[in-house]
Amino acid sequence: MQKKLFGTYFIIILFTLIVSVYFTWSKSYEFLTKQYEQQFISQGNLISEFFKAKDIDNYDEIQNFINKYAATMEARITIIDKSGLVIADSDEAPLAMDNHAYRTEVKRALNGEIASSIRYSNTMGNYYSYTALPLKTNFIDGVLRLSIPVNAIEKITYELIRYIIISLIICSAIAILIAFLFTRIFMKPINTLTKAVGEISNGNYEKRIYINQKDQIGKLADAFNEMAVRLKLNMWKLTQRKTQLEAILSSMNNGIVAVDDEFKIVFYNKAFNEVLSITDEGIVGKSIYDIIRNTVLFNVLEKSIENNENITEEGKLLLENEEKIIRIYANPIKLEKTKNLGILLVIQDLTQIRKLENIRRDFVSNVTHELKTPLTSIRGFVDTLKNGAINDEVVAKRFLDIIDIESERLYLLIQDILSLSEIESKQNEKNVGFYNLSEVIFEVVDLLKPKLKDSQLEIKVDIENDMPEFKCNKDRIKQLLINLVDNAIKYTEKGHIIIKTNYSNEHFIIEVEDTGIGIEKEHIPRLFERFYRVDRGRSRKQGGTGLGLSIVKHIVELYDGLIKVESRVGEGTRFIIRLPEKK
């Protein structure tokens, strides 16, 4: 802008210079011409008076006089009679000259006027400025004409113009310098404003301008500073709202995606990628048809746009490694009294919910079955006793023993169900303290040793020395170990059971290994499901409820741990538990 402003000043100064030179030239030329005319008129009148006073009466005296006087005046003098013949001339021989009766200035002078004109002289071959006056003496009745070449006037004019141009150039140079300094001073606050605006556009809302001027630029600087303050405040509010909105949407478990009327993605949250297993992070601006391949989703999307209404549907989503059940909510995005701007899709992953519903249904079915079997047995033996078997002491005692065993099974089953419920709801976890795991392990071993009587089985304990204490509910850890060791005892006829524990990388590692019958590979993924039994007949015969390993897994998860199973059929099984240290 400084160059443009300076360029404007330069053009104005140059234009002014040209116009000044032109008018100076024309006016100077006109002024000098009129000056010569006035001078010639005055001098012509003097010559006329001289002719009258001297009473010159011959042509030779006239010729000598005008020759002398023309040299003094530096002008050409011509005497013309009434008929137009040249009587005398200071520059040319009169006899060689044409009749001048029809020359403009001569013609008017013969009529008694003082006349002037500029025209080309055929005799002299140049342009002349002529001034003619009537001349009447005793000897002469005609015209006195004085003339000067135009180039003489032009020469004086050029000389005058030269000095004027030099003066104008000096003045113009001073004006240009002043214009340059003025534009620089004028542009300084504007450049400051421009730089500040650039910093504001780059996000520096702290920029301020301090200009000690009270004119429009000063007011502009004050307005800019006020604008910067308000802009910073508005941007802060927008950033806060944007952050809050993103935080809200990002914290939602449901996938959210907004598409425009051309089905291009304009917004999505992290859960959307997780639900649909999308690894590409740069999907904004891409068509949703290029990102997702699901008929249910497309149907919901297109139906919502077509009918301009909310649509909800459930369907299956087939991914590479799994199948998910999803519920899709489609809601048109529109402003009041305007067309649809797009569609907002909310995708809810129902896979876990449906899985839990199935687990709950299976749990109710399994509990019913597990309760029904001993209750049926108890009721059968009670009816048998009522029908007379009670009178046979031996039979009655045997039936009562069976009823006692079945009652014990019911009791243990109910205890395991209640225990599982407590663990899931994290009840009775107030009795937490720091305990030595080795002491807990030895307590469990002492508790279960009676079950090894009359068996070819041995329990070995391998505990690392100087382990830190573990923050836990002691009863829960005992329950975990009891279930694992008791299972090992039930499914190991001979050999040994090893309980190991050590501390590594801020984790307590507990291993329970046996030399039992082992578990087939296909059963391992479902081993921790409630009421899942590898060998149902043997499990019931051993008195198991089918909830032991499920309780173990829930206790491990209660302490944010991991459990792993390694097993080979006929060689044995090893359970490995990693529990993070709670400081």
Image: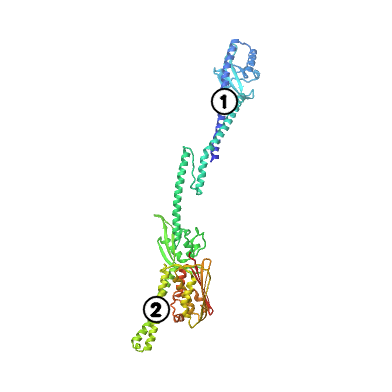
Q: What residue is at 46 percent from the left and 40 percent from the top?
A: 219
Report how far apart the C-alphas of labels 1 and 2 lie in the structure: 134 Å
Figure check: 206 above or below 287: above
* Quarter of the figure with residue 38: top right
Kindly state the secondary structure of the residue where label 2 is placed: helix
Q: Residues within 10 Å of mark 2 (few under 14, many from 20)?
A: some
Q: What residue is at 38 percent from the left and 86 percent from the top?
A: 397
**Numbered mark located on residue 348 in the image:** none
Q: Residue 56 vs residue 299: left or right? A: right
- The total number of labels drawn is 2
Figure check: 227 above or below 573: above
Residue 120: in sight, yes or no?
no
Query: Which percent across, then down, holds residue 150?
Result: 61, 24
Query: Which percent across, then down, holds residue 186?
Result: 52, 38
Query: Which percent across, then down, holds residue 333?
Result: 42, 58
**Numbered mark located on residue 28 in the image:** 1
Q: Earlier in the sequence, mark 1 or mark 2?
A: 1
Front-lying residue, 569 or 157: 569
Query: Which percent across, then down, holds residue 579?
Result: 49, 68
What amino acid type is highlighted by mark number 2?
Answer: Leu
Q: Residues within 10 Å of mark 1 (few under 14, many from 20)?
A: some
* Quarter of the figure with residue 371: bottom left
**Numbered mark located on residue 410 in the image:** 2
What amino acid type is highlighted by mark number 1?
Answer: Ser
Q: What residue is at 52 percent from the left and 63 percent from the top?
A: 279
| Residue mark closest to the camera, 1 vs 2 | 2
